[in-house]
Amino acid sequence: MSREQLDELQSEAWGLEASPAKVAILEQAVQLADSLQDVSEGYNVRQQLIEAATFGGMEDRALVAFSWCLARSDKEPDRFPEDDLLWKYKWILAGVTDYPAIPLEKIRAMEEDFERRLKRNGYGLRSLYKLRMDNANDLGFLQAGKEFEEKWRKARRDGMVDCHACEVDAEVSVCVGNGEYAEAIKKARPIMSGKIGCHTVPQRTYADIIIAELSRGRLEKAAEAYESGYPQVAGNPDFLSTIGWHLCYLTRAADIPRGLRLVERHLPWASQSNNPSERMAFYSRVGTFFERIGQERPKSRKVRIPTALTIHNDEDRYAPADLAAWFQAEAAKLAARFDARNGNGYTSWDLADTRALALGLDRPEYEA
């Protein structure tokens, strides 16, 4: 093992998009830096690993690397300034609820730790309130989510808050979550018109527009969001959850040909995803899509299913009802793990609500 090998690994990773492949290379580089007892290189490579894992669908690997960096910063704050880690702390907290193995107590402790570090470095709490709002809503603690929403809206902006486009996108998402669909569409206008944007907006915003328009029964408007939005995310696994909402539109529209193409293209991403929440959501939407096919055309058909999935067969022929049952059952198993962690039934309800939206059924009420 040599420093030249370490440089080669980092050079190899540099040219790759965030992905499991890049994460694997950087993890090798971390091991090599540690074997060389090079703390500075170990820290720097882990910084790269945190970004690659966060945006490559492997947030749990990012958490491990981030925890090491944070501990090293606490030990040597002059050498590894805490302020340099705070933005990445936002990334970590934004994905921490996606893993049911991470207990609520750990999530709360991380949120409180982030608050202390923000204050210590002279920042306000707007970024924290945004994260706590999102996390509370993800966990099914909707009243707490509303309380943090109010705090987020009132808190001052500073150097730790998201860009303007992301903040407007967040307002759109909040309106959708509150059932304020017309207001969501109104707030999204600066984004949809191209006046504001960033590297993830409007890509993410189209998902909220689809939800809002389907909820209002405006299929033609949802179609416009699909036509404009799907091509922008189709090549990027980091937008798997957004792609799932495009599949919801195709399910509602009963567009079987395009829906099948979407499923066959992106199902391998979901099956290989290290993120249980994203895998659960996509499987659920795939199950609902095949449920819709079963209603329209119940006969067996050719579908390319990843070989790693237990439902796969060598003939690649399946009854839509069988695929619907399998994917919905897999999603339900994951939802049960989230419900057990959260101490409520919110995640299972959320899957049922999305299914009803995609099929045009009456949507269930959530009982906290």
Image (cartoon, rainbow, N blue to C red):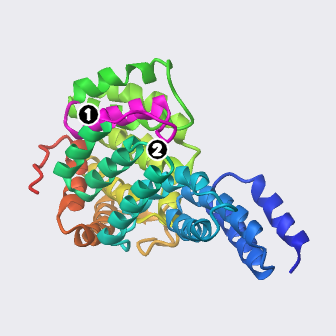
The magenta segment is: 153-180
Residue 33 in the image: above or below residue 98: below
Q: Amino acid at mark 2?
A: Tyr
Q: Residue at x 8, y 55 (%)?
A: 367
Residue 291's label in the rendered image is none
Secondary structure of the residue carrying tag 2 is: loop
Q: Residue at x 72, y 62 (%)?
A: 44
Residue 128 in the image: above or below residue 78: above
Residue 217 in the figure: left or right of residue 300: left
Judging by the rendered image, the residue that carries numbered circle 2 is 123
Quadrant in the picture for residue 26: bottom right
Q: Residue at x 38, y 33 (%)?
A: 156
Quadrant in the picture for residue 149: top left
Q: Earlier in the sequence, mark 2 or mark 1?
A: 2
Residue 211 visible in the displayed image? no
- In the rendered view of the protein, which quadrant contains the N terminus? bottom right
Q: Is residue 179 magenta?
A: yes
Q: Amino acid at mark 1?
A: Cys
Disc 1: CA contacts within 10 A as few (<14), some (14-19) or many (>=20): some
- The answer to which of 89 and 180 lies nearer the viewer is 89
Judging by the rendered image, the residue that carries numbered circle 1 is 175
**Residue 299 placement (x, y as % from top left):** 32, 56
**How far apart in space, not on screen, are marks 2 and 1 (Cα)?**
27 Å
Secondary structure of the residue carrying tag 1 is: helix
